[in-house]
Image (cartoon, helix red, strand yellow):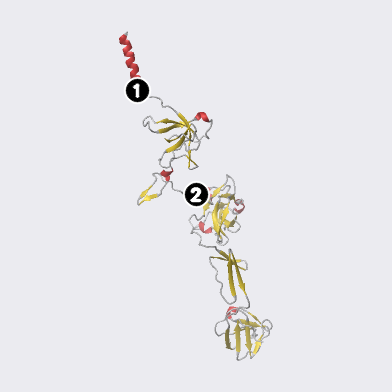
Amino acid sequence: MAQGRRRLERALRGMLDKKVDKPKEYKGLLGAWVAGVETVGVATRPDFVYVRLRGATGEVVQAFNDEVSEVFDLPVIVIRDPKNPHLWRISGRDIGQYGDWGGASYIQPHGRSHSFTPQSEGEFTGSDPAWIFKRQYMPLLPRPITTGSGAIYIEADYYWWAGSYHYWPGSGTDDLFQYRPTGGGAGRFVTVYIRGDEGIPDYLVGPEFSLIFPPPDPLEMILVPDPDIGFAIAAVSLQTGTEQIGWQEIYDLRLTTVAPPETGSAVHIYDEGVSKGQVSALDFVGQNVEAIVTGSYAWVSVTGTATTATYLRSGEAIPLFSPTGVYWTVSEGQYVTGSLAVMANGVWQIPVTDFTEQYPESGTFQFTESPETGTLVAAIWGAPVPQ
């Protein structure tokens, strides 16, 4: 009897020696306030997170985490690591505190593994760098909308235009199917661009070309917007039978790398409504011209009558169209634009009354009534006619 009892006790001790004690579990909430900011990860200890035991702000521990996503206030269970009893470790989510966590799978923080930042000469971080292609770059990204849609969507971003930043909030384009080729077996490109001043999309419809006998380089059929009007976003390839616009129809024309804007404000110059481009500086020259700058405004004052260059030439007046002799020119020397006075046979011909200018840069003029060809004719450009 005693011998049997001893065998039983030895067997029980053997089992107890091999038994792993279940660690004591503690409930807590993920994260803590560091300098008043909600913080989950411990900055000085990679893979460690803050846990507020029992949710109390006065009982904050640092626990090793390879079990849950770093979500502030996430209910978790922590234990003392069996192999390292001096360390806290997260054992899992406290699923008794909520019924649904959104169905998200846990992915351990691993952003550094996708980084390709140089640390020193010949050394880079990240064992699995993520190579980012242009279509993964979201600002102003042209993308399909839905299957069967004839429009594309342009994502939001800021853009620099005419000396200031503008915001494009993101929007879809018009239905581009209206620009499909009408001929059989034909194709064309429609350039989608943003008008810089108005901040709206616009379109350039390229010429049709044969898909059976395509041009050597179809990309030459892509039209480019005037850089003073807007900037290109994408070229959409449309064919006679196009029924939807997907990624394969969108040619991304964004310039993802551009020069920084020049220091200072750009000024857009127009001549009678025709754009002459942008400049970063204006220099006013000439007599009786005064420029005053106050704050963001500039005033240019012109007083009196500015004096223009005067050229005096003498010689025979030459009829340009014989035999009528209606058009005349003074052939010698250089002429400039401006008011014109002509002396024929010692008589000044009064502008408008006796002649009109024709092709001023060439020095050619026309008499209303043709005077006799004299031996001495003077032409004065840029000077009033003597009375």
Q: Is residue 109 above or below residue 176?
A: above
Q: Quadrant of the C terminus?
A: bottom right
Q: Is residue 318 visible?
A: no
Q: Residues within 10 Å of mark 2 (few under 14, many from 20)?
A: few
Determine which of the numbered discs, if any, sits on residue 18 in the image.
1
Residue placed under numbered mark 2 in the picture: 135
* Residue drawn 59% across the image and 74% down it: 289
Residue 294 seen in this snapshot: yes
Secondary structure beneath dot 2 equals helix
Residue 79 place in picture, x, y as percent? 42, 30
Q: Amino acid at mark 1?
A: Lys
Residue at the limit of the structure toward the top, as seen here: 1
Q: Taking 385 as reference, is 276 above or below it?
A: above
Q: x, y (%) of residue 311?
A: 57, 83
The image shows residue 285 at horizontal and vertical percentages of 56, 74
Measure the alpha-carbon separation of dots 1 and 2.
57 Å
Q: Secondary structure at mark 1?
A: helix
Label 1 or label 2, whichever comes before in sequence order: 1
